Image (spheres, rainbow, N blue to C red):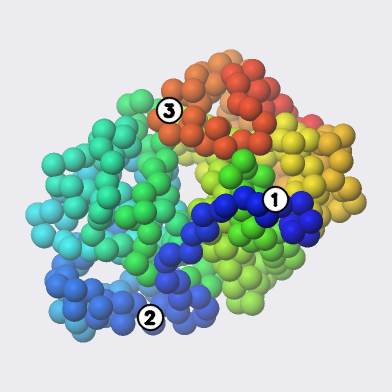
Amino acid sequence: MWDNYFDMNTVSEIRLKTTAYVGPGAIAKIDGIVEELKKRGVSQVLCMTGGRSYKLTGAWDHVEAACKKHGVSITLYNKVTPNPTTVAIDEAVAMAKKDKAGAVIGIGGGSPIDAGKSAAILLAYPDKTAEDLYTFKFTPDHAVPMIAINLTHGTGTEVDRFAVATIPHLNFKPAIAYDCIYPLYSIDDPALMTKLSPDQTRYVSIDAVNHVVEAATSIVANPVSIAFGIETVRLVAKYLPKVLRNPEDLKARYALLYASMIAGTSFDNGLLHYTHAMEHPLSGMKPDLTHGLGLAILLPAVVLECYPARAKVFAELLAPIVPGLDGEPEEAEAAAKGVERWLASVGVPQKLTDVGFTEADIEPLVKLTEETPSLSGLLGCAPVPSSPERVRRIYTNSLKPMA
């Protein structure tokens, strides 16, 4: 276990900040949350969401009823897309400022919640834009209250301090991390997730696995990031096949949702490195690429590069999906190919060539990895030093299957 190899002389900063309501029926907690917002003087909220799921899941009915009951008006922005843009965030904030919104409710997966976090900052800094925020032209230390109603089990954004948005004209997809955007409350209700498509179910669950593979092996990993990482992979390995067989299995959905939540806490503590830093240029260049799929494509090549530096951690972490690893550096190739086989076994065999990338795209991707704001910080957390050559090798090894 982690206590056999973690240096306990290390002083670790362990983050556990958001109050999360987890379990079937947790959506009913929105009533008390809106009541608290009203007591704080909030009479108007901005709801950030996508075009359909907020209504199809029934989440909107609860939000609308709670707001009506407690005399809180809603400014609805329901045009958030996957890989949300700074343009959309500014559009929503303009509406919210006109209505004098004093809090934000994000309803959806990572995209609406991240966009909501961004809006929560900008409502507190009315002279700033989303591009200012994501090009680090200012450092926020406060935001209006943010509530997250989670509709997927993958991002962990409902319990962490991170948000991501794309700056379209630059193909940049930076990440921000500020304490002021921890959601005040989050709702993780597995009953809201039974209508996720099989592919969505796969991709969001793989996102959670990627979070902990990075957070448990980074240079700032701590006992929480490692222990939560081990449990995350165990739960996803056990329950993802069950949900794919029976999407209505609430026990299995709960397990995947819990795995996603603790994975979010894991990377809130241990941070991220190669897979996320290198996926952002992929979906920056091709905004229609699903984030979790991009991560899955890169993961085996990242394991190949990083395994020798954290072999003991990787062996324990990957045991549920790649059994038989002993934690020796020379196992890197076996571990990487084992991860690739597991991904294929849950229906995600794709590589970069399958989603439209070619060898000609490698150099532009390497350049974006170097130039996109914030990505150097992620790469600096990797267990092996980052270089253009290593980044290029990971992209190249992700073009086609290893096995």
Residue on which the image places disc 1: 7
Residue at x 45% of width, y 57% of height? 160
In space, the residues marked 3 and 2 are separated at their CA atoms by 39 Å
* Marks 1/3: CA–CA distance: 33 Å
Sequence-wise, which precedes: disc 1 or disc 3?
Answer: 1
Q: Give me the C-alpha separation between circle 1 and circle 2.
A: 40 Å
Q: Residue at x 33, y 71 (%)?
A: 60
Report which residue position mark 3 lands on.
372
Q: Please state which amino acid type lies under the numbered disc 3.
A: Thr
Callout 1 crowding tier (Cα within 10 Å): few <14, some 14–19, many ≥20: few
Please, is residue 41 above or below residue 110 in the view? below
Q: Secondary structure at mark 1?
A: loop
Whether pointer 1 and pointer 3 mark residues with C-beta atoms closer than 8 Å, the reply is no
From the image, tell me which residue sits under label 2.
29
Q: Is residue 55 above or below residue 170?
A: below
**Residue 336 % position (x, y):** 78, 39
Question: The disc labelled 1 sits on which kind of residue?
Answer: Asp
In this picture, residue 236 sits left or right of residue 200? right
Sequence order check: which comes first, mark 1 or mark 2?
1
